[in-house]
Image (spheres, coloured by chain):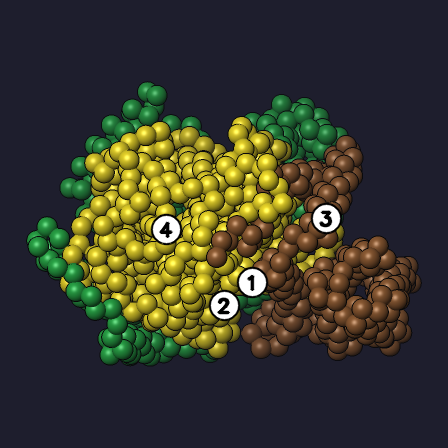
Chain colours: A green, B yellow, C brown
Amino acid sequence: MKKLKQLLASGALLTFVSGLTHADYGLNMPVGVTETSRQVYDLHMLILWVCVAIGVVVFGAMVYSMIYHRKSQGAVASQFHESMTAELVWTVIPFIILIVMAIPATKVLIDMHDSSEADMTVKVTGYQWKWRYEYIDEGVDFFSSLDAASNEARQLGSDIDPATVENYLLDVDHPLVIPVGKKVRILLTAADVIHAWWVPDFGWKKDAVPGFINEAWVIVDEPGIYRGQCAELCGRDHGFMPIVVEVKSEEDYAVWLTAQKDTAAAAKLAAIEDLDPRELKMKGKKVYRSTCVACHQKKGEGVPGVFPAIKGSVVATGNIDKHINLVMNGKAGTTMAAYKDQLSDVELAAVITYQRNSLGNKVGDVVQPKEIAALR
Amino acid sequence: MATVIDTHDDHHDHGPASGLMRWVTTTNHKDIGTLYLLFSLIMFMVGGAMAMVIRLELFQPGLQFVDPSFFNQMTTVHALVMIFGAVMPAFVGLANWMLPIMVGGPDMALPRMNNWSFWILPFAFAMLLGTFFMDGGAPAGGWTIYPPLVLQGGDGFPFMIFAIHMMGISSVMGAINVIVTILNMRAPGMTLMKMPLFVWTWFITAYLLIAVMPVLAGAVTMLLTDKFFATTFFNAAGGGDPVLFQHIFWFFGHPEVYILILPAFGIVSQIIPTFARKPLFGYSSMVYATSSIAFLSFIVWAHHMFTVGMPLQGELFFMYATMLIAVPTGVKVFNWISTMWKGSMTFETPMLFAIGFVIMFTIGGFSGLMLAIAPADFQYHDTYFVVAHFHYVLVTGAIYAIMASVYYWIPKWTGHMYSEKMGQWHFWISTVSVNVLFFPQHFLGLAGMPRRIPDYSVQFAEFNMWSSIGGFVFGLSQVFFCYIVYKTIKGGEKATDQVWEGAEGLEWTLSSPPPYHSFTEAPEVK
Amino acid sequence: MSLEHAYYIPHDAKWPIVGSIGLTLLLGGFAAQLNGSSAAGMAMLVGFLVLVYMMFGWFGEVIDESEAGTYTKLEDVSFRMGMAWFIFSEVMFFAVFFGALYYIRIFSLPWLSGEGAGVATQEFLWKGFENVWPSNGPASVGGEYEKMGPWGLPAINTLILLTSGVTVTWAHWGLVANKRKQLIMGLAATVLLGFIFVGLQALEYSHGYNELNLTLGSGVYGSTFYMLTGFHGFHVTVGAIMLTVMLYRSMKGHFTPENHFAFEAAAWYWHFVDVVWLGLFIFVYWL
């Protein structure tokens, strides 16, 4: 009850203050930063004003009638109840208005469907609950999930005020980076359930359907950081898989791309080395907190009946090969995904070691990255 | 054609039996109508309670009360309960009560089946709501139950599937009964084009129901076999397609939307002439418009799925067809306004709700037209703009019409006038709060808030808070509505047979409340 | 005119609630069974028996009323319309599965194999997949299998069902002409053909499962094949049971040349499953 009161009080305060200070909240669709988004915005405004105009006429007539044709004003009811002319008029005129709206809509739609002659291609795969970005022909491939600060604050009962977190729920660890002014073809698919990739400033969203690829494209005019969210219900953490796109100048993009390739090479090297158990556990904790915690919970207790516990579980305290297999290949028909594509050898080794030797488990064995690599 | 009854059973009582078994075994259309309406009211409160949980969690950014998976269960079951448990049974209840009387018939054509149509529902909903207590909780994949997400459900999944099957059986039987009643039970002289519009709209609705409920049944059956019997209808690995489900679902779903609104059109077309004291303008064009809407509803389904990645030709076709719906819908609105024009209006509660319907449904219609434009829909889709849109057409549309009809006919049903003062209060509190609740959601959606999320970034905080406050007030005002209904059943000023000065139609020629068997003589139809 | 006698309104319907209980036990039991509950089979059985009891009771009551001359032309029309609309709802149910087959063959398989909008789908996800019907999809779900050809059992079954359509019509002529013997013989032949059809269908399934490795899990081909023919087979069984009841009633001397709605309803239903079969033969077995 106290909590509720607190909420109401702070809520009321928030309204008044924010009305004065946050002048930047949006009421309307963003104009966006692409040709498409501007076309869509114009279309949106066109229909909106058409609707407003019709609304003024229709509601105006209604209000007039309600004021002047009321019994208390002494109005006597006419008995007319038919007019072919009227029916024709209000069938034909709306029809013409519709045609006027359909013409620009058709044009925009045709443009949006043309993803030919792209300068580069990024394959985007939706996972529960993160995005994977693969730069086709570049060998750059990474996952993008909710950033740590938001993730901590969004836990039930975290007691962290979201207002203190920068870009709360709209920030990720590794944003998608693309060059400005280039036509980027985006191939959308999903690994588990349907997701939808949406950055409002780009002017469109599209579903990521498992087993199929949808094509879309974008040319961004200005460098900057653009944020969006998954727009198709995809399970428990649907609200927590944002999209961040960093649009860089061509030179900066080239620098970034080289750095990414170097990091990838370094990671490959690292996978050959053995790590000491303590380091594995430390790395594992990080992976666990970003990847496993959503379902299996902070202390590995799970959610009874929905997500099994890791603490004291048969898998995490039993045969290690079975444990590795489950994490790498997932379990069909459940939310437990196959993580072999989502995590690197080091990350897999680390998180499995962590699960077996933490969260109340004390098995004492260790998995090294090269053992994982051998299983691929 | 007309009345009743026990031809060979002389000692049989012509009134109702007493006790609980009266309600379990009744074949009387009014009893069954009452059961439907009460059931619908209970479900309205259950679904409303879930909406309150949703609005409570969304009151502020951050997660304060429920786990995200429970939140998803709330949004999913809220929708299922409101659509299949509140709005549809309310309309069927109204049909049961009013159709036989309005066409001057003795009862529904198939009275025993009528009983079964109702008595499946409590079992179906017990099954659906029972899933909350199972491992994995209630279905949480959205009321649209898209695979593959819905296939991840826990023990509740098959129960939900079978609950939907049962609701479908109930709806199809109910709809068959409505059609047969209208075609076969009319009083002499009650030609089709003399039928009140409520009868007409229900006639068309029943046709839609019979056409699409089996489609839903087929769709959920495929879900069941995909999960438990290794079929791959919705799995690309086996050659299927998750999007196939969406096509089938919306082939059901779009006509379903009209199932939820056509009877409301009928109700409003009854009420406005009464309180304008003027005959309905353009009766025949109303009938044709309703039929056109029903026809179009079968060829527009994919506008719910513009973003799934259809070929261009598909998107263009569904965009054009959807835009066309604006024409007959517009005709209806213009006819209502012309009915009011130069009338002699008074504004009792039913009229207030009917006018509220016309205005706010039209707002929902406008946002619907915006959503029809495919390129713009790429921005609107799956945001709060859509949430605002369908709540305008369903809450201030369908539910407002149901409220209007309750105030309009409750004097006839109970023989008591409701308290006009309370009714007016109910209307004004509801109307102010419902707009505080849903209007800001347009802005939220345009500004980029996706639907079906339990938490949001802080820029959306303010409108969400307003929306929640509106929601709580709207919720409370419906509790007040329950009280008004209870009070009217219990007593109140005696209602006349005519009830409303401008009312016309067979229902007003009967006493208030009508005798257990409505017409003992075939009524004369003017 | 006094309308006291115009339309029969039954009272005290106790069967619907029995039906609801039976249906809930059957479906709830089935759901629990799918979740792996061990006691669920019992609930299903009880539910099924309750439903059978309900049908005996309910239809029995209606038959008694009908035989007692309670119904006039008006009730008869209600029943007819009711049955016609029920069959329409069944048509829509089958339309879903035919629609799914259509979508899979016209859209999803071509896309998966890189046609039309599916270029990237094939290139990045299902490299090398070619669309040849029948298909169990790019991942060859369910493993190697063989197609169920049209010209063996299915052709014979087509003949059987078409013949049964003729015999039921012949029985109807007998009924209208008040030739009781022709009615009974026609019905008996129809029922026999109906059950032979179901038996052959069962044989075909066992052939599919045991020799062709064609199962429900054989990708979309297996899914659509068994779901369509399975639901059809179920409807044939129901229709044959309905006709069996009609046969029994005919032998007991029910029906008159003027008044035999139940017979006609069963016959309509039979023609409906007949037509569905023609669709199946063409779209599932042949094309």
> Do tags 2 and 4 sit on the same chain?
yes
Q: Residues within 10 Å of mark 2 (few under 14, many from 20)?
A: some
**Residue type, label 2:** Phe
- Label 4, secondary structure: give it: helix
Q: Which residue is mark 2?
A: B298
Of labels 3 and 2, the one closer to you: 3
Q: Which residue is mark 1?
A: B211
Mark toward the start of the polypeptide (4 vs 1) = 1
Please tell me the numbered disc located at residue B356.
Answer: none
Q: Residues within 10 Å of mark 4 (few under 14, many from 20)?
A: many
Q: Chain for mark 4?
A: B
Mark toward the start of the polypeptide (1 vs 2) = 1
Task: Please indicate, yes or no, whether residue C6 appears anywhere in the rendered image.
Answer: yes
Q: Give the mark count.
A: 4
Q: Which residue is mark 3?
A: C64
Q: Is residue B143 left or right of residue A75?
A: right
Of labels 2 and 4, the one closer to you: 4
Q: Residues within 10 Å of mark 3 (few under 14, many from 20)?
A: few
- What whole-number distance in Å separates the C-alpha atoms at marks 4 and 1? 30 Å
Residue drawn 40% across and 74% down? B320
Task: Please indicate, yes or no, whether residue A201 appears anywhere in the rendered image.
Answer: no
Q: Is residue B468 left or right of residue C168?
A: left
Q: Which residue is mark 4?
A: B507
